[in-house]
Image (spheres, grey):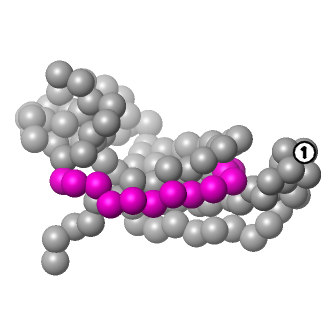
């Protein structure tokens, strides 16, 4: 089965927490920019190949309403939700009001320039 490529657009995101799953030693040996692209990464460098054109998502969960989501909802006047996402390198927690999910073509990279 072919992989699915999706874009997740978190609208009105008021908080974002990003923590790494990777140990400091992996970061230390993975700072070379040649490790940024899966297609051109040099395996002899020995570091983690970031492949920043995408991250593999291992899972996502909508967390129960919390004090912080209630506080933002009251202050702004719209509902806010907390989402937790695990990828192959990062643990993400986002507080946003809306989520738009859309299919994107293979190779979609809106922020990559030549």
Q: Residue at 85%, 45% (x, y): give it.
A: 76
Q: Position of residue 96 (x, y in %)?
A: 67, 51
- Badge 1: how crowded within 10 Å, few (<14), some, or many (20+)? few
Quadrant of the frame with the C terminus = top left
Rendering quarter of residue 104: bottom left
The residue closer to the viewer here, 61 or 99, is 99
The residue closer to the viewer here, 73 or 90, is 73
Q: Position of residue 103 (x, y in %)?
A: 32, 60
Q: Residue at 27%, 66% (x, y): give it.
A: 4
Label 1 element class: helix
Q: Is residue 47 visible?
A: no
Rendering quarter of residue 98: bottom right
Q: Is residue 17 part of the magenta span, yes or no? A: no
Q: Which residues are magenta?
A: 95-106
Depicted 89 relative to depicted 70: above or below: above
Q: Is residue 108 visible?
A: yes
Q: Position of residue 12 (x, y in %)?
A: 66, 44
The residue closer to the viewer here, 104 or 71, is 104
| Residue placed under numbered mark 1 in the picture | 75
Q: Residue at 46%, 54% (x, y): give it.
A: 8
Q: Position of residue 112 (x, y in %)?
A: 27, 30
Residue closest to the far bottom: 1
Q: Is residue 67 left or right of residue 84?
A: right
Depicted 44 relative to depicted 104: above or below: above
How many dots with numbers? 1
The residue closer to the viewer here, 84 or 48, is 84
Q: Residue at 27%, 40% (x, y): give it.
A: 109
Q: Is residue 66 left or right of residue 22?
A: right
Q: Is residue 6 left or right of residue 86?
A: left
Quadrant of the frame with the N terminus = bottom left
Which is the main secondary structure of the residues drawn in magenta?
strand
């Amino acid at each position: 089965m072919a992989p699915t490529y999706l874009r997740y657009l978190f609208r009105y995101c008021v908080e974002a927490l990003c923590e790494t799953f990777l140990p400091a030693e992996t970061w230390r040996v993975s700072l070379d920019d040649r490790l940024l692209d899966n297609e051109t990464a040099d395996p002899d460098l020995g570091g983690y190949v970031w492949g920043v054109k995408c991250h593999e998502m291992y899972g996502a969960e909508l967390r129960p309403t919390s004090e912080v989501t209630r506080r933002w909802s009251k202050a702004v006047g719209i509902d806010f939700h907390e989402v937790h996402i695990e990828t192959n390198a990062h643990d993400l927690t986002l507080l946003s009001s809306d989520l738009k999910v859309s299919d994107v073509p293979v190779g979609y990279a809106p922020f990559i320039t030549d």
